Structures are given as C-alpha cells and as structure tokens.
Amino acid sequence: MMMNNNAMTYKTIDSSRISMSQLMQPSHSNFRGKIHGGYILNLMDQIAFACGSKHSETYCVTASVDTVDFLNPIEIGELVTMKASVNYVGHTSMVVGIRVESENIQTGAITHCNSSYFTMVAKDDHGNSVEVPGLIINDKNELKRFLKAIKRIETKRSRQNEFDSEDFSHMDYLDELKNYRVKIELPDSTD
C-alpha cells in the first residue's frame, strides 16, 4: 500500500542506513578490562547523529535514548560494528535504531552486545526544529520496526499521563508494591 503526500518528501530507510566499525583498544576499557559502556554510548550517539543527519539532511540533536540494554560484554581487541537506521519519523524527530555487535577477529565469532533507540531532532542553523522527510518502507522488518516505535511512543505517553495526572495517588499502588523489595515510609502528609 502506497501513501502519497505531494507536499512532503520521502526517503527510503536504506538511503540513510549507516554502519561503522572500530577496533576496541585498552584505552576504551573499564577497571574490569571490558570495554566501558560509556564509550559504547558515545559511539552510539555519533552513529545516531550521522544516521539522523543523513536522513534529514541537516544537523540533529539527541532528544532521548530509550532502552539501552548491555547484553554481553565487549573485550579489548574485538571489532565492534554498529548498524543504524531510521525506524520512525515524526514531524521533526526520528527514531534511530542501533544494533551493536562485537567480533572476535581471531575466531570470527560475532556477538550481539546491545540494541537501542535514539530519538533525534532535526535543527536548522538557528536551532529551530525543522520538518524531516517521511519514510518509504519497502520491507516487512522495516514495517515492524516502524510499528514497534509507535508502540514505544504510545507506552511512554501513557506512562507519563498516568504518573503526571492530577489524580495520581500513591495509595493506588501500595498493593502492587508489596511484590517488590521496597519499604514505604512516607511522612504523614497528603502529598
């Protein structure tokens, strides 16, 4: 099914897909000899910027980072490859999906280390948000990623509405909290 809007430009996801590889060195490691998570996040931010800027054809800033799960450690001497693509676009924002893999260059074994979603916002030379091109989706995995991004956005909005509501009361959650390792010792007040 093709949706058409003549006023807006559209680009394929492939046109802004980026891959980058870097050899992990001892200077990138933490005190345990594994590659420091902060260093990997820095690289992820760089590739998200490049991918978002390539899609929007303008400067981008990171608005948020969602779901950074470090699944497996990365060793010194491994080749880390990051793959980024625009999974979703709004009016001025894009969700860039990033997959991080490490490769043992001696054995060729590849390990999935991390996946994350960076929301990037396109900016003009004066710092104002600008409209980004729409997406042309031409593969089922791309469609699934777009739909998953919509669900993540809806879930985040729903959670914000639930907890930012004027009707919010922690009393509604006390039974639920009994299943967690938390002790509630609030002062006697209605706040």
Image (cartoon, rainbow, N blue to C red):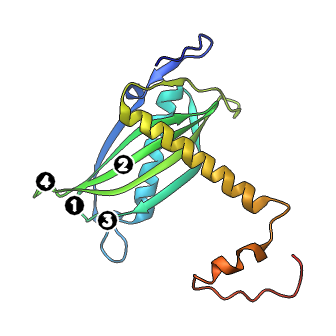
Label 4 residue SS: loop
User: Residue drawn 63% across and 84% down?
Assistant: 178
Q: Does 52 sit above or below residue 176?
A: above
Q: Which labelled disc corresponds to residue 72?
A: 3
Label 2 residue SS: strand
Q: Distance between the residues labelled 3 and 2?
A: 13 Å
Tell me residue 65's x, y (percent).
Answer: 54, 52
Q: Does 136 sit above or below residue 164?
A: above
Q: Mark 2 points at which residue?
A: 99
User: Residue drawn 63% across and 52% down?
Assistant: 156
Q: Mark 4 points at which residue?
A: 108
Q: In this view, does 154 lie to the left or right of 126?
A: left
Tell me residue 48's x, y (percent).
Answer: 47, 42
Q: Can residue 50 be seen in this view?
A: no
Q: Does 33 sit above or below residue 95?
A: below
Q: Distance between the residues labelled 3 and 1?
A: 15 Å
